[in-house]
Image: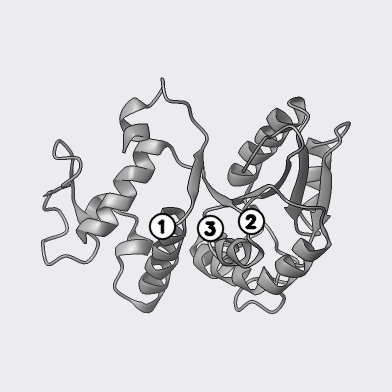
Amino acid sequence: MGSLQCAHVLLFPFMAKGHTIPLLDFAHLLLRRNISVTVLTTPANRPFVTESLQNTTASIVDIPFPANVPDIPTGVESTDKLPSMSLFQKFASATVRMQPHFERMLETLPSVSFIVSDGFLWWTLNSASKFGIPRLAYLGMSSYSEAITREAFISGICYGPQPEDEPVKLKRFPWIRLSKNDIDPEIRNPDSEGLAYNELIVKVLSSTAESGVLVNNFYELEPVGAKE
């Protein structure tokens, strides 16, 4: 990535306040180090981002959120506006339709040193690779919980033949045992909605495995999770 003195960083938060706020805090950290920052958002989320970055030199660019997403009301561009969190998977999966707008936006920006995009925006890795830009995935969870979640998927706990309350030892964390009951019902449910959510998580984890990962944490707080 070279020297950060003349760097230009593109931040692309997921459209949920709990995911957006930490990346806006990160923007302030970068700006204090005289690093140029562009934050990408959607029209309905722009006022919140603008207020958070007022009196800074950060640039804010918006691209349209997909229209006509099944079961997502028109104008809803943030998870806190969803009528039910059961629609989260449909909302998150719909963001892939933003990719053409994202790539057209990349063509217009000054040279980008690297991209930090939310893990749920897994498809940005493909775009970043296409433009030869390094991409870091931001994960809202802690290092430890991210490592545990990844191992749970690799171990097949969600769809294993064991009863729902039977603990299964994690290979990388032998002191931890998880059962299906410890996994979100949306993920371990074998119906079509559960499988769709599972496919989304697999895409998220796969994209993070192919790029660097940024977590809202520091080593001294969570050394075990950081090492994993």
Q: Quadrant of residue 50?
A: top right
x, y percent for residue 140: 51, 43
Give the residue type that dot 1 points to: Leu
Front: mark 2 or 3 = 2
User: Alpha carbon of mark 2 to alpha carbon of mark 3: how far?
Assistant: 18 Å
Badge 2 crowding class, 10 Å Cα cut-off, few under 14, some 14 to 19, many 20 or more, is some
User: Alpha carbon of mark 3 to alpha carbon of mark 1: how far?
Assistant: 9 Å
Front: mark 2 or 1 = 2
Give the residue type that dot 3 points to: Phe
Q: Secondary structure at mark 2?
A: loop
Q: Are marks 2 and 1 in contact (CB under 8 Å)?
A: no
Q: Which residue appears at 29% of the width and 73% of the height? A: 190
Instruction: Name the residue beneath numbered marker 2.
Output: 133
Picture disc at residue 205: 1
Q: Are marks 3 and 1 in contact (CB under 8 Å)?
A: no
Q: Which residue appears at 26% of the width and 53% of the height? A: 152
Instruction: Name the residue beneath numbered marker 3.
Output: 120
Give the residue type that dot 2 points to: Ile
x, y percent for residue 125: 56, 61
- Is residue 220 shown above or below 1? above
Badge 3 crowding class, 10 Å Cα cut-off, few under 14, some 14 to 19, many 20 or more, is many
Q: Secondary structure at mark 1?
A: helix
Q: Quadrant of residue 73?
A: bottom right
Instruction: In this rendered view, identify the residue nearer to me: 10 or 139.
Output: 10
- Is residue 169 shown above or below 68? above
